Image (cartoon, rainbow, N blue to C red):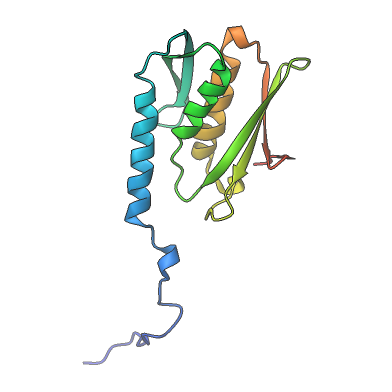
Amino acid sequence: MTSTEPAIAPDDPSTVQTLESVPSPADALVNATRLIQARARRLVVPADPVAVDLYTVDDRCEGYQSEPVQVPRPQSMETTVAWIMAEQAIPDLILSGYRTSFDPATKTVTIDLRVARNSRRVLQSLSLCEQKALLGSLRETLIHQPDWKIEAVTFTNRGNPLAL
């Protein structure tokens, strides 16, 4: 019997998959653990609580669902942003941090995202659903809190306007 398919040499670089491109099972475990810990924080009622509606993308990625949570009154906006950021699990996107600032004159919050240097993805590679999950959840949550009086949310990437 003869085959019409070409033989593949074991040292052919086009057929060898590097270890860097193989997802690590440890990464999935770390992400799952981080998500469980982030969600568990919602169960703890702070000493001086204030109710906040946390908006997350729905299962079909078509809209948002709100969930009331209790956050500490001091730093309530910062805590809420931290919770949303902690619950994001976008494959291969590693954020090294973020900064928030509020301009009371324009009633605008700016969130400066910091992608880690070792991240396999950049913010511009996010699908529409991933953008809704990360950026949309932040925007919806911040704008829909009447006590905070926020009218707009902008995003930057290391200080540069984020264009997606």
Residue 80 on image: x %, y %: 51, 22
User: Which part of the image, by quadrant, shows the C terminus?
Assistant: top right
Query: Horizontal placement of 23 versus 110: left or right?
Result: left
- Residue at 55 percent of width and 26 percent of height: 138
Q: Which of 59 and 83 is in front in this view?
A: 83
The image shows a total of numbered marks equal to 0
In the figure, 112 relative to 145: above or below?
A: below
Q: Which residue lies furthest to the right in this view?
A: 105
Residue 129 on image: x %, y %: 49, 37
Q: Quadrant of residue 8?
A: bottom left
Q: Nearer the viewer, residue 120 or 66?
A: 120
Query: Horizontal placement of 11 versus 106: left or right?
Result: left
- Residue at 36 percent of width and 57 percent of height: 24
User: Which part of the image, by quadrant, shows the N terminus?
Assistant: bottom left
In the figure, 8 relative to 74: above or below?
A: below
Q: Which of 16 and 63 is in front in this view?
A: 16
- Residue at 38 percent of width and 51 percent of height: 27
Q: Which residue lies furthest to the front in this view?
A: 47
Q: Which of 44 and 60 is in front in this view?
A: 44
Tell me if I can see residue 106 in this picture.
yes
Residue 116 on image: x %, y %: 57, 49
Residue 135 on image: x %, y %: 57, 32
In the figure, 145 relative to 34: above or below?
A: above
Q: Quadrant of residue 110?
A: top right
